[in-house]
Amino acid sequence: QVQLVESGGGSVQPGGSLRLSCAASGFTFSLYAMSWFRQGPGKEREFVAAMSWNGGSTNTADSVKGRFTISRDNTKNTVYLQMISLKPEDTAVYYCAASGSSHYAPRFARAYDYWGQGTQVTVSS
């Protein structure tokens, strides 16, 4: 069955860094666009970053541009989110997702077919 398993979350001080990983199985990872979304306390789920099947197309939310970088390794069926200069407002549960619209890097949740369970990121002093 399809699985997306996020890891790498945790607690960090403002200005710190984390790298999230999402390991995929049960589908042909290299044929899917991948993304990260997040949901903060009391907020709706929001788009963070996305990458097409071969990395040729990416999208990043303005709120994290210059601080967060999405990447993928199709040989390891894994997508990553490198986060630097973290801020308290980055506190959220981070989800990875997979979309069959593989040539694009969709920003909209409805474009995604599979979702992980999420990993908590807390930024606090």
Image: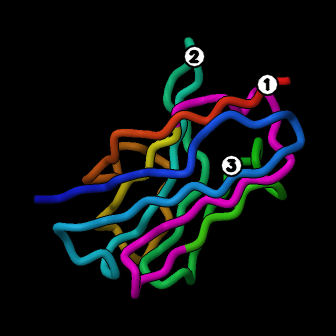
Q: Which residue is mark 3?
A: 61
Residue type at mark 2: give it: Pro
Residue at 41% of width from left, 69% of height from top? 33
Quadrant of the frame with the N terminus: bottom left
Give whichever of 86, 33 is nearer the camera: 86
Residue 89 painted magenta: yes
The disc label shown at residue 124, or none? 1
- Residue under label 2, please give it: 41
To which quarter of the image does residue 22 belong? bottom left
Which region is colored magenta? 72-93
Q: Compare marks 1 and 3 and give the one earlier in the sequence.
A: 3
In the picture, the quarter occupied by the C terminus is top right
Residue type, mark 3 in image: Ala
Residue 116 lies, with reference to residue 34, above or below; the image says above
Residue 88 horizontal/vertical position (percent): 79, 27
The CA span between labels 3 and 2 is 19 Å
Callout 3 crowding tier (Cα within 10 Å): few <14, some 14–19, many ≥20? some
Examine the rendered structure and indicate whether residue 90 appears above or below residue 112. Answer: above
